[in-house]
Amino acid sequence: MEGATEEGIELSVVIPVYNEEDVLPELFSDLSAAFDSWVTGRWEVIFVDDGSTDQTASLIAGQNATDPRFKSVRLSRNFGHQAAVSTGLGFAAGRFVGVIDADLQDPLAILHTMYQACRSGACNVAYGVRKRLEVPILLDLSYKTFYRFMNRFSDHPWPVDAGDFCVLDRKAVQLLLQLPETTRILRGLRSWIGLRQTSFPYDRPNRAAGRSKYSLGRLSRLALDSVIGFSTAPLQFAVIAGLSMSFFCVVISGLFLLNRLVPGFTLFGYSVGASRGVATIVISCVARVCN
């Protein structure tokens, strides 16, 4: 880590980055101006470099040389956004810890409001809720569908349209770090720990520069991990489907057997007993299909 973690820090802000050289210079300037104006004490920014291949690492190192409050953790390869966020939480030393993206789509004014809410004791967790997204219609529909599905079927409250943008107090951070999950999705774990949580709606603007690193494949993987990790709905569906198939097989097998034993009873207008061995073959095939 470039820049040692220090005691007595009021606010730590974790920012996962992956090939963000285009946006970093503006981000450095905006963060310095904002935090110097409203953080009541010392602050630090922890960039978690998730295996960047451009000039991201050198830009952060240069900023650290100028201002040690900007620190970085460099991962050995690209582990993914959620893993980078969890890593940053482990290095954050502040009384309060914020999580934002590097693309300047998480407004610092909202971060300030969330920080003040946690600092005043109004809540342990303050998180942003996206009222409006500047994304293609199909992608926006996919986001809305996913969040409403999770809100309906999650085993605990899952806030609708809430991403990773948040501020946590030290108690919430410690609870998150103690959880043993290997697949760590902050927005799910954050809501799972409970405590006092408050939402802050905001409009999410377009990226300031660069492009999103979340491909359709990565978004699908994130959604799948969320559904599997925080909902029993897939397991319940599998059980219901299995029981339904078993019931269907028992009924069909029973009807064929009845036709074989009672020739006067025909199934779908066809007498199974008309040909020897047909009932045995049909019942065996049904049993194999159901297994």
Image (spheres, grey):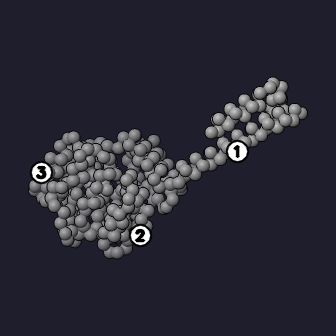
- Most foreground residue, 127 or 4: 4
From the top left corner, tell me how far across and down residue 17 is, in percent: 26, 49
- Most foreground residue, 265 or 236: 265
Query: Within 10 Å of the Cα at label 3, are there few (<14), some (14-19), or many (20+) other Cα atoms?
Result: few
Q: Which of the labelled discs sits on residue 247, or is there none?
A: 1
Which kind of residue does numbered mark 1 sit on? Phe
Q: Is residue 144 visible?
A: no
Please identify, in this view, whether the residue under mark 3 or under mark 1 is nearer the observer.
1
Circles 3 and 1, Cβ within 8 Å, touching? The answer is no
Disc 3 is placed on an element classified as helix
From the top left corner, tell me how far across and down residue 274 is, in percent: 83, 25
Quadrant of the rendering where the N terminus is positioned = bottom left
Q: Is residue 278 visible?
A: yes
**Horizontal side, residue 234 vs residue 127: left or right:** right
Which kind of residue does numbered mark 3 sit on? Gly
Label 2 sits on residue: 195
For the point 43% across and 67% down, the residue is 194
